[in-house]
Image (cartoon, rainbow, N blue to C red):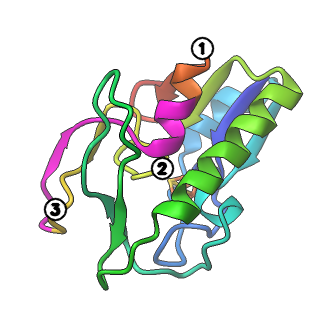
């Protein structure tokens, strides 16, 4: 069973109200069992919503919960963590062993995220949902790696 970022399938759940439709992901999933989810919506955030970035990128082995602020300076960490937990629960309930996630997102990013300065600069790191799924042994792959 595969979990996939809903925006990659064309669902308009991106912060801007748009999507990140990926024909390659849709093609890949054609004959496979999958579940789509948007962790940020699962965490209770509305769409559209202000963009958000992780302020203290997760470090391997760190016990500190990363903080997420939106561009208006509001702390949206709780919603991001709730969304990550909800996505993990979906995975555990459905026997998900692979997640195809949108690169660069503060929730779904697999290898890269924005640096927290809202300047468009990307750094190595993972979104909160991606990091949590990885901690639970779920293989991750971004749409770029597919
Ligand atoms: S949280 Fe993930 S699924 Fe939702 S819009 Fe962002 S990248 Fe897409």
Seen at 61% across and 20% down, the residue is 136
Q: Earlier in the sequence, mark 3 or mark 2?
A: 2
Is the CB atom of the residue marked by disc 2 within 8 angstroms of ligand 1's nearest atom? yes
In this rendering, the answer to whether 73 lies above or below 128 is: below
As for residue 6 lying within the magenta part, the answer is no
Label 3 to label 1: alpha-carbon separation: 30 Å
Q: Is 115 on the left or on the right of 61, as rendered?
A: left
Check disc 2: other Cα within 10 Å, few if <14, some if 14-19, many if 20+: many
Please tell me whether residue 1 is drawn above or below residue 23 in the rendered image: above
Q: Secondary structure at mark 3?
A: loop
Q: Quadrant of ligand 1?
A: bottom right
Which mark, by number, is residue 137? 1
Hey, which quadrant is residue 109 in on the image? top left
Which residues fall within the magenta stretch?
Answer: 119-132
Please tell me whether residue 128 belongs to the stretch shown in magenta: yes
- In space, the residues marked 3 and 2 are separated at their CA atoms by 16 Å
SS for tag 1? loop
């Amino acid at each position: 069973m595969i979990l996939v970022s809903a925006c990659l399938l064309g669902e308009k759940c991106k912060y801007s109200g748009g999507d990140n439709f990926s024909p390659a992901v849709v093609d890949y999933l054609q004959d496979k069992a999958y579940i789509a989810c948007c962790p940020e919506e699962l965490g209770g955030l509305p769409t559209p919503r202000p963009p958000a970035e992780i302020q203290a990128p997760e470090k391997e082995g760190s016990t500190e919960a990363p903080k997420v602020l939106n561009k208006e300076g509001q702390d949206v960490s709780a919603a991001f963590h709730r969304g990550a937990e909800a996505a993990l629960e979906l995975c555990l309930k459905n026997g998900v062993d692979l997640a195809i996630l949108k690169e660069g997102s503060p929730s779904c990013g697999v290898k890269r995220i924005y640096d927290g300065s809202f300047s468009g600069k990307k750094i190595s790191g993972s979104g909160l949902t991606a990091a949590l799924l990885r901690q639970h042994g779920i293989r991750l792959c971004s749409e770029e790696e597919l």
